[in-house]
Image: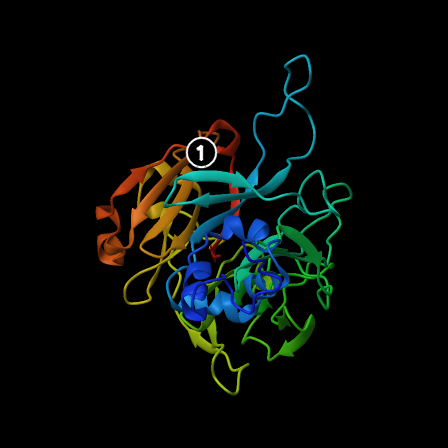
Amino acid sequence: MVSTELSPELIPGLPEEIGLECLLRFHYSTHLTAARVCRRWKQLLQSRDFYYLRKQTGFTQRAACLVQLFTGCSDSDGSKTVGPPTYGITVFDPVSGIWGRVDPVPKYPYGLPLFCQITSTEGKLVVMGGWDPSSYEAVRDVFIYEFTTQRWRQGKQMPGTRSFFAAGGFEGRVVVAGGHDENKNALSTAWEYDISGDEWTELSRMSQERDECEGMVIGSEFWVVSGYRTDNQGGFEGSAEYMDLRRRRRGEWSRVEEAWKGSLCPSPRSCVGVGKEKELFYWGDCYSGIRVGACAVALGEWTLVSGSPYQGGPQCFFLVHSYSYSHSRTHGQIFNTIHAPLHFSGFVQSACSLDI
């Protein structure tokens, strides 16, 4: 057999374009092993261009990444452990139905910062902010998980301390906006983080302060939904603001009045749905099985939805097909129950979709 280290071809004996077609079809879970074949394979598999070529040709895999409460933990005598809740990152593949876990962040081996934000871009998972699980102090940490290497790396810290902010990823960048500072003052500021350049850039302010707002990317637009002002604690706004991340002059916010109308839950955190006409709705309004703690993550044709039918009830998981996303027909959506293994049945605090 000819060594691929010595061969100019991606796969010896095959034309270059055929060899590339073969590598494009590799499942992301094989990339770590495939990268060990030779230096050229490693450089290709871990390159940004290769990711976009896979995405363009339809060979990326869509998965849901959940910040999920660990369950089933007990002492040696079988009693339930007492202490603060512990969260980790769960990955769910809707095609195979496989549930898995991402290795812990090295700085926080026993659980993620509480209320951290999670988002994704270019096949990478980004975790930022939250509260230190030991001291409950707000942190500015940024961590990026590379699925091709299955390793975490630490990014440049957030420019300022903020909690319960909106976050969203798009084309190698992450935008954060709103939330509150260490003095509980609601924020209107926004920043953009360049993952490859490891740099933060300040954006223009939103039209108002928005604490406990929700961030989401719709097409090329970053939306910040609802939230409340410092002088109106818990008084969630019905308005939203968005910024087109592809426009040459980024940083210009557009405001939409009466965009958020969650009837059962005024807070938009992790539970905003998007209809066919870009109208926003509350997932907890759609089905009695997710009235409490609703959380949803769009996965292309499907959306993974979790929640409980009542306070303290069991966590339920469903897949809903996108054809039923019409705000006028929310109660007509078909919720397909999916089984989550015991260790993946904990409360979902937040989630994001990921093209790997």
Q: Nearer the viewer, residue 222 or 29?
A: 29
Question: Is residue 309 visible to us here?
Answer: yes
Residue 75 x/y as whole percent: 68, 19
Q: Amino acid at mark 1?
A: Gln
Residue 290, picture quadrant: top left
Residue 178, picture quadrant: bottom right
The image shows residue 26, relative to residue 172, as above or below, that is above
Residue 17 x/y as whole percent: 42, 70
Q: Residue at x 57, y 25 (%)?
A: 72
Q: Nearer the viewer, residue 185 or 327?
A: 327
Residue 342 x/y as whole percent: 49, 27
The residue that mark 1 highlights is 315
In the rendered image, the residue lying farthest to the top is: 77
Q: Residue at x 45, y 65 (%)?
A: 20
Residue 190, picture quadrant: bottom right
In the rendered image, the residue lying farthest to the bottom is: 249
- Answer with left or right where residue 234 lies relative to residue 286: right
Residue 247 x/y as whole percent: 47, 84
Neighbours of disc 1 within 10 Å: few (<14), some (14-19), many (20+)? many
For mark 1, give the secondary structure.
loop
